[in-house]
Amino acid sequence: MVLQNSLDALGRSGVVLFPSDTVLGLSCDATNQAAVDKIFSVKNRPQSKSLIALVADMEMLATHVESIPEAVHEILKDVSSPTTIVYPKVKGIAPMAMAEDGSMAFRIPKSGFALDLVKSFGKPIIATSANLSGAPIPENISQINCRILEQVDYVVPLKSDTYPVRPSRILQLTTDGKTKTIRP
């Protein structure tokens, strides 16, 4: 029922508050500009800041990036912590979700509700922290700003009182297929 309620909200261009694989997050359909606009509004986030999207697997990723260098396969095969990779050219994503240069950050969750959600939805979903832009990332529902709680379309019932605040490592692909660390 929780998964279906989340899918219903995403399908209606809605925003879902959910436990991601890294932090308490906000999600929407990454391919839907109206939904992405709503995320920016809910977070009071400057539109110049790009977002991160979750994909279910390498196959889903391949449909939204120009290419996946072999180095990425190696990085993701041996990764022990959540790793987000910024790809230089993407397609099929809402324009406001991307950076001005057409790049976009993607992550494949290892397991859990976030992975179940993106697999069931069948296309990329935004995953951004459930805080107002510039505010601390919340560790529990009581730390989430009431403005956010009032504007989301569905709140996934949380199984824990506290969630760790551990944003993912971010790597950026360079045009020559190498990577550089943006956030360790």
Image: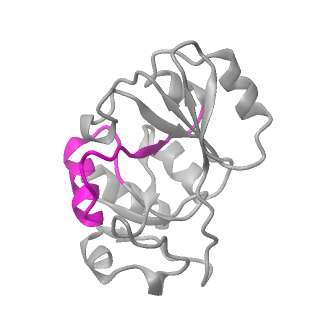
Q: Is residue 84 left or right of residue 76?
A: left
Query: Does the magenta segment cover residue 55?
Result: yes
Q: Position of residue 150 (x, y in %)?
A: 26, 78
Q: Position of residue 166 (x, y in %)?
A: 63, 62
Residue drawn 60% across the image and 16% down it:
177
Q: Is residue 8 visible?
A: yes
- Disc tally is 0
Q: Is residue 174 above or below residue 2?
A: above
Read off the magenta span: 28-57
Q: Position of residue 17 (x, y in %)?
A: 41, 67
Q: Is residue 158 left or right of residue 96?
A: right
View extreme (bottom): residue: 142
Q: Is residue 69 above or below residue 99?
A: above
Query: Does the magenta segment cover residue 141?
Result: no
Q: Is residue 1 visible?
A: no
Residue drawn 40% across the image and 29% down it:
103
Who is closer to the viewer here, 121 or 87? 87
Q: Position of residue 128 (x, y in %)?
A: 43, 56
Residue drawn 35% across the image and 23% down it:
91
Q: Quadrant of residue 172?
A: top right
Q: Quadrant of residue 43?
A: bottom left
Residue drawn 25% across the image and 64% down it:
44
